[in-house]
Image: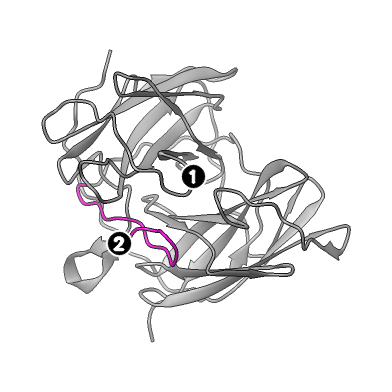
Amino acid sequence: MRTATRAAATLGVAAAVLGAGWGAGALAGPVDRPAAAEEHAAAGEHGSAEGGHDAAPEAGGHDLPAGLAVSAEGHTLDLADDALPAGGAVPLSFRLLGPDGAPVTAYDTVHEQDLHLVVVRRDLTGYQHLHPELSPDGTWTTPVALTPGSWRVLADATPTAHGEGLVLGADLAVGGASEPVPLPAPSPTAEVDGYTVTLAGDLVAGRESEVVVTVARDGVPVTDLQPYLGANGHLVALRAGDLGYLHVHPTAASGAEVRFAVVVPAAGDHRLFFDFRHGDVVRTAAVTATARSTP
């Protein structure tokens, strides 16, 4: 049974500025942790130097990331089910409803896909970047295999009739017992399938910050990354606590370096997920970054 559209309640976010740092991560995928969370009533569009969406203004002069609301700009993310079983792959289905209440069936292709779906654990320890299939009736479907806990579903797409990108989010409960997992401690690197991914940069809230990513294998820089979604890498930043969403593509790539221009709206902890393709396999590395306030 489809879930009814819920009025989202805005959560206040107070981020203490403790300095800037990077946190080690692991291969992204389904990992544990529960957390009940409300949906936010405000949503923007994600920010990127190449083809991203810009954040909407937040009260008090700050920016609010995208993905904090189930409805925005006349569109609504409608999950077929707001709860799924844990374990093996099960179908996750949803629709984007337009201003007339009917399912949207026409989308613009952005970064080689008509829709980018991010499914993330509320504690930021589980992450999947998926590309569902669209049926003629406007239903998107993709298999997911998730561990127990509270997850967030983020749909990033550009309905053709709307002409602008939207990021909508809804909560998804996955049945079973789970334990909280804290955010990883600061470290500049993540290890994934024998690859060492290093992210260097200093995030400053409200300013464009350059993040430089390098990938090495057995201590040797990888200089032949294969294109993924039309670029040498892909970066998603999610704000700890509310899972505000930022989707970023490279500004430049040369040799072993992939450069991104990242604008985070507020100070505080963020989890950054870097997708890269090498040897015909897409892998994801994750690190934690603490954005400091604007001087």
Secondary structure of the residue carrying numbered label 1: loop
- Three-letter amino acid code of the residue under disc 2: Ala
Residue 256 in sight: yes
Residue 62 got which mark?
Answer: none
- Pick the front one: 52 or 193: 52
Secondary structure of the residue carrying numbered label 2: loop
Residue occupying image coordinates x 46% and y 68%: 262
- Pick the front one: 164 or 167: 164
Q: Is residue 43 magenta?
A: yes
Q: Is residue 42 magenta?
A: yes
Residue occupying image coordinates x 35% and y 74%: 206
Q: Quadrant of residue 220?
A: bottom right
- Three-letter amino acid code of the residue under disc 1: Glu
Residue 55 got which mark?
Answer: 2
The residue that label 1 is drawn on is 112
Residue occupying image coordinates x 51% and y 46%: 124
Q: How is the image coloured?
A: one colour
x and y, in percent, of residue 219 in the image: 87, 63
Q: Is residue 27 toward the left or the right of residue 41 in the image?
A: right
Q: Earlier in the sequence, mark 2 or mark 1?
A: 2
Magenta stretch, main secondary structure, is loop
Q: Residue furthest bottom?
A: 295
x and y, in percent, of residue 272 in the image: 54, 57
x and y, in percent, of residue 214 in the image: 70, 66
* Magenta stretch bounds: 41-53
